[in-house]
Image (cartoon, rainbow, N blue to C red):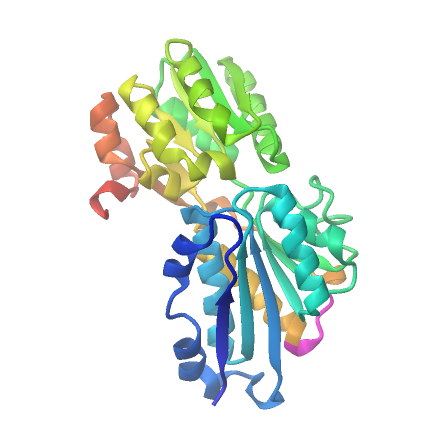
Amino acid sequence: MMKSAITRRTFAKGLAGTAAALGGLGIAGCSDNAASGSAASSGTTYRIGVLQLTQHSALDAANEGFIRALDESGISYEADQQNANNEQSACTTIASTFVNDGVDLILAIATPAAQACLNATTEIPIVGTAITDFAESGLVESNDAPGGNLTGTSDMNPVADQIALLTQLVPDAAQVGLLYCTAESNSEIQIQMAEEELDGLGIGHERYSFSSTNELQTVVETMVGQVDAVYAPTDNTVAAAMAQVASTADAAGIPTIVGCDTMVEDGGTASYSINYRDLGYRAGEMAVQILTEGADPATMPVETMGADECDLVYNQQTADEIGVDVSSLASDGGTDVSAEA
């Protein structure tokens, strides 16, 4: 019988939410699939360090998908789950701990987590996920040929489609607020793409940025009366506080087009969204190839999900509250996430 184990050492505020999301995915999943796993005969128990930047639904889903892929592969593994609570210093400490522990592979969830792991080791294989652009963030030489010990799966958004969605729902929008955290390079990339799209459409826009969670509420309140709609990419800090953002924006009647489905679930208006469980699952498949087949991260292209793999989602409850007609999204096959809550 193959075995798996997931341990969680609490760092700062801990990992309660992620622990709940991952609970039950370890031993049962591997045992059920042991006979079919090609790696089952190796007799090796792999030690895997998992560094998640912060706790919010999208990153939790990517983590869950990764663990599911490991379970379904039939390998025996021990996963040490760590959450840095959105603190770069914590990322650095955790990454160093993994290196000192001599883990066989590291999963880094989100860009700052991957940067910390890459700074800690050039030898241990690293698989990153929920990272927008590996090359632009300085993690790899190129997305097609990483060239080092890190590869993974990208959550690059269909930004053009998201801006088109904004204009579909708010056709008279003259000014769009772009909300993001300056500490996240992945957000900067997406904001630049959004600006290019808005410029092409002749729609005004302004950046509303912040450097820490403590500033977020004030920045969101500043937008009230200044913008006709808000665009927020897959920014981890915004996503973690999306319920707070939505509370202010919805009360002011401001539609929010966001980067992923979990942000819509937390009160955003709509999104073309990547499925983060699928994204994490793909990362898990890459990890299995590295561990069991000797695949080299240096030659494994970063994997992306196309716009045709994204989900159109909307929040009918939010739309009703702010007076936005989303009936066209239902006609287009969109999913009302408020109905699933």
Q: Nearer the viewer, residue 335 or 214?
A: 214
Decide: is 92 above or below 73. Answer: above
Q: Is residue 265 left or right of residue 280?
A: left
Please report the bounds of the magenta region as a residue range.
292-296
Q: Position of residue 188 (x, y in %)?
A: 61, 30
Q: Is residue 65 left or right of residue 327?
A: right
Q: Residue at x 34, y 29 (%)?
A: 246
Is 294 inside the magenta-drawn segment? yes
* x and y percentages locating residue 338 in the rendered image: 24, 41
Q: How many marks?
A: 0
State whether the magenta stretch is mostly helix, strand or loop: loop
The part of the image, by quadrant, that contains residue 296 is bottom right
Position above or below: 63 against 88 = below
Residue 183 placement (x, y as % from top left): 61, 32
Residue visible at 59% across and 43% down in the picture: 132
Q: Is residue 284 left or right of residue 21?
A: right
The residue lying at 23 percent from left, 48 percent from top is: 340
Q: Examine the rendered structure and indicate whether residue 156 appears above or below residue 98.
A: above
Q: Position of residue 126 (x, y in %)?
A: 67, 60
